[in-house]
Image (cartoon, rainbow, N blue to C red):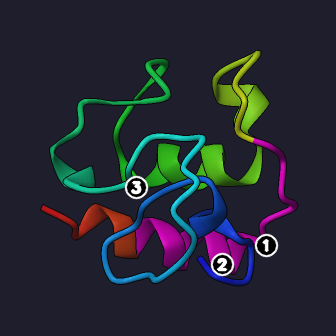
Amino acid sequence: LRQYACHDCHRIEGVVGPKSYAGPALVDWSRRKYIAGAAANTHENLVRFLRDPQAISPGTLMPDLQVAEAHANDMATYLMQLE
């Protein structure tokens, strides 16, 4: 999450960073129903969103950070365990 500077825009449990949040806090992730209001909140959809946000939610402000598949999988695993 630090490598892709996610904490620059989001508050993330367990990740220290600046307090200039442009995006929503990534807390209680496992309780969310949708990703970007567009797709069911599943591990697979989250990996897809992290790798290609526009494909899941056209017009989203989430940038395409060129997240490697292995990294997206690790990120999704971490976020999905946040209650």
Say what secondary structure mark 3 lies in: helix
Quadrant for residue 27, please give it: bottom left
Q: Is residue 66 magenta?
A: yes
- Can you say which quadrant of the picture contains the N terminus? bottom right
> CA separation, marks 2 and 3?
13 Å
Rendered position, 79 above or below 14? above
Q: Is residue 28 magenta?
A: no
Give the Cα distance between marks 1 and 3: 15 Å
Left or right: residue 65 versus residue 80 is right
Mark number for residue 43?
Answer: 3
Residue shown at 34% from the left, 39% from the top: 41
Q: Are marks 1 and 2 in contact (CB under 8 Å)?
A: yes
Q: Position of residue 57 (x, y in %)?
A: 65, 22
Residue in the picture at 70% in, 24% down? 60
> Which residue is drawn at the image coordinates 65% and 63% (left, top)?
8
Q: Which residue is mark 1?
A: 68
Decide which of 48, 2 is in the foreground and name it.
Answer: 2
Residue type indicated by callout 2: His
- Where disc 2 sits, the SS reads helix
What is the magenta range? 63-77
